[in-house]
Amino acid sequence: MVFGYSTNAFVKFSLLDSFDRIARLGFKGVEIMCDQPHLYPPEYDDERLKTVKANLEKNGLKPTNLNSFTLFAVGDTYLPSWIEPEEDRRNIRVDHTLACLDIAAFIGCGNISIPPGGPLPAGMTRQEALRLFHRGMDQVIPRAEELGVRLLVEPEPDLLMERTSEIKPFVAAIQSSVVGVNFDIGHFFCAGEDPAAAFEELFPWVGHIHIEDIAPTREHNHLIAGLGAIDFPSVFDAMQRLGYSHDMSLELYPYTDRPEEAGRESLAHLLPMMQESGLTS
């Protein structure tokens, strides 16, 4: 397992500068934000991608995940989504996902994370939304299978899927080896679940982990590890016991004014617990 840090905390720096800074902190991996101001697909041709790949190699950083969740370049954190009523809006999400899959294959990243549907539109039933989400997934799964890049759905508070009981039947029903779960420890805590228990139940589908702390109120606000109430050792123990072998990325996008300090503090808090549980970083 490689422990990375997401560039979405470094939006005040260029992509390549963020690689340098993350490597200097001691991380061995990096999750790349596939949106402006970082690796937004329409802005990256093969030559720019070669530069990205070379810089990763220079810094000794493994790309742990491509985060294709947000679309600030043309929308916001959640929109355009997979489940909007307008087909042209849904197609933007589909096209973005296809482009991110191609980039992942180009730079040697084994997975991308995608949103869990989106906010449920007014007047749309959950069943209708799920049908639209499945229709969108049908448009991207063949390319993911062809490239050997996993599509990891990330449950998120207040979106179509936020709990184990919602994501598990969705990914299980698809029955494709490239479809799995991006397990955000804090998101399951926000949804009122025990992250360790949720991880154990979803383990067969987990292809990448997001880690951050969350306050005891369970409000969805990513915190520096150690400033919240999450029982990290119980999650790490479950990861070790089950033989988790994929990667994990620290996600601290609220700390854009001090991403290095936030990363350093989180690393200092988490590494001893990871080592105590027998995990490597």
Image (cartoon, rainbow, N blue to C red):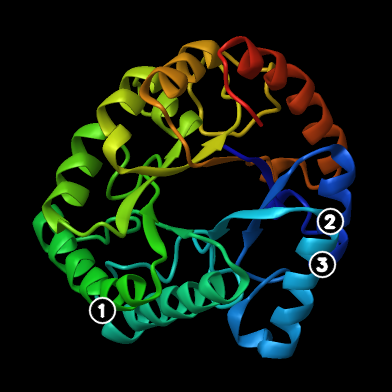
Label 3 with label 2: CB-CB less than 8 Å: yes
Secondary structure under badge 1?
Answer: helix
> What residue do we see at 16% from left, 47% from top?
172
Choose between 87 and 142: the one closer to the eye. 142
Q: Residue at x 74, y 43 (%)?
A: 28
Q: Tell me the amino acid under the disc marked 2.
A: Asn
Taking depth in this image into account, of 108 and 32 the one nearest to the observer is 108
Contact (Cβ within 8 Å) of mark 1 with mark 2: no
Picture quadrant where residue 270 is located: top right
Q: Is residue 14 visible?
A: no
Q: Nearer the viewer, mark 1 or mark 2?
A: 2
Q: Residues within 10 Å of mark 3 (few under 14, many from 20)?
A: some
Residue at the spot of label 2:
59
Question: Which quadrant would the C terminus be assigned to in this image?
Answer: top right
Q: Which residue is identified by label 1?
A: 139
- Which residue is tagged 3? 55
- Disc marking residue 107: none
Tell me the SS state at disc 3. helix
Q: Amino acid at mark 3?
A: Asn
Say whether disc 1 or disc 2 marks the residue closer to the N-terminus. 2
